[in-house]
């Protein structure tokens, strides 16, 4: 377990570094934009990447537990947690849990935004 945790941590380090670099790059491309292009880019790319990796894992069994920890949990998790959120939503739809899909989507968004607002208010 410790070994897999360290492997996931290494992937998380790489993902976080990529997120940082993409954010800087996008700010360089569109320095005056109010739109959060860096976050948007890593969320979209991370969602595609986690879909491809899970697809390879499920269909072809190509990912060992260590590779999965490195690339899915670590890299994608460090790049963006949105990718895991998107995959969770996909699984709920694929398993025909439409009500849970809506509850998870709405509650995650509403509570996430509320908690950010609360955290900022507490600090003010």
Image (tube, helix red, strand yellow):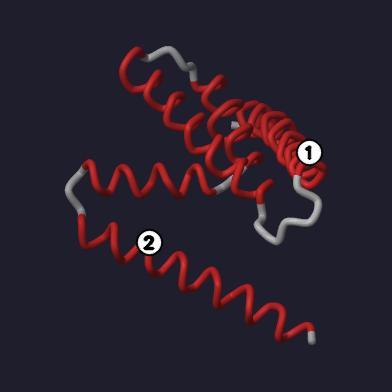
**Between marks 1 and 2 in the image, the one whose residue lies nearer the viewer:** 1
Q: Quadrant of residue 15?
A: top right
Q: CA distance from mark 1 to mark 2?
A: 30 Å
Give residue 64's position: percent from left, percent from top: 49, 17
Query: Where residue 105 is drawn, which disc sits there?
Result: 2
Nearer to me, 17 or 66: 17
Q: Residue at x 56, y 44 (%)?
A: 43
Query: Where residue 3 is drawn, which disc sits there?
Result: none
Give residue 67's position: percent from left, percent from top: 55, 20
Nearer to me, 17 or 2: 17
96 sits to left or right of 80: left
Residue 113, placed above or below residue 122: above
Secondary-structure class at tag 1: helix
Per the image, the residue denoted by label 1 is 25
Which image quarter is the C terminus in? bottom right
Residue 83, placed above or below residue 3: below
- Residues packed near mark 1 inside 10 Å, few (<14), some (14 to 19) or many (20 plus): some
Give residue 1's position: percent from left, percent from top: 59, 31
Q: Quadrant of residue 41?
A: top right
Residue 107, placed above or below residue 57: below
Specify which label sits upstream in the sequence, 1 or 2: 1
Secondary-structure class at tag 2: helix
Residue 117, placed above or below residue 15: below
């Amino acid at each position: 377990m410790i070994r897999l945790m360290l492997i996931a941590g290494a992937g998380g380090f790489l993902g976080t570094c990529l997120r940082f670099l993409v954010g800087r790059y996008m700010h360089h491309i569109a320095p005056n934009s109010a739109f959060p292009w860096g976050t948007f880019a890593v969320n979209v790319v991370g969602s595609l990447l986690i879909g491809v990796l899970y697809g390879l894992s499920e269909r072809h069994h190509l990912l060992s537990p260590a590779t999965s920890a490195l690339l899915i949990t670590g890299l994608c998790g460090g790049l963006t947690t949105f990718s895991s959120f998107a995959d969770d939503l996909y699984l709920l739809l694929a398993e025909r849990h439409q009500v849970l899909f809506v509850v998870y989507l709405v509650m995650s968004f509403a509570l996430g935004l509320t908690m950010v607002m609360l955290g900022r208010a507490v600090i003010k």
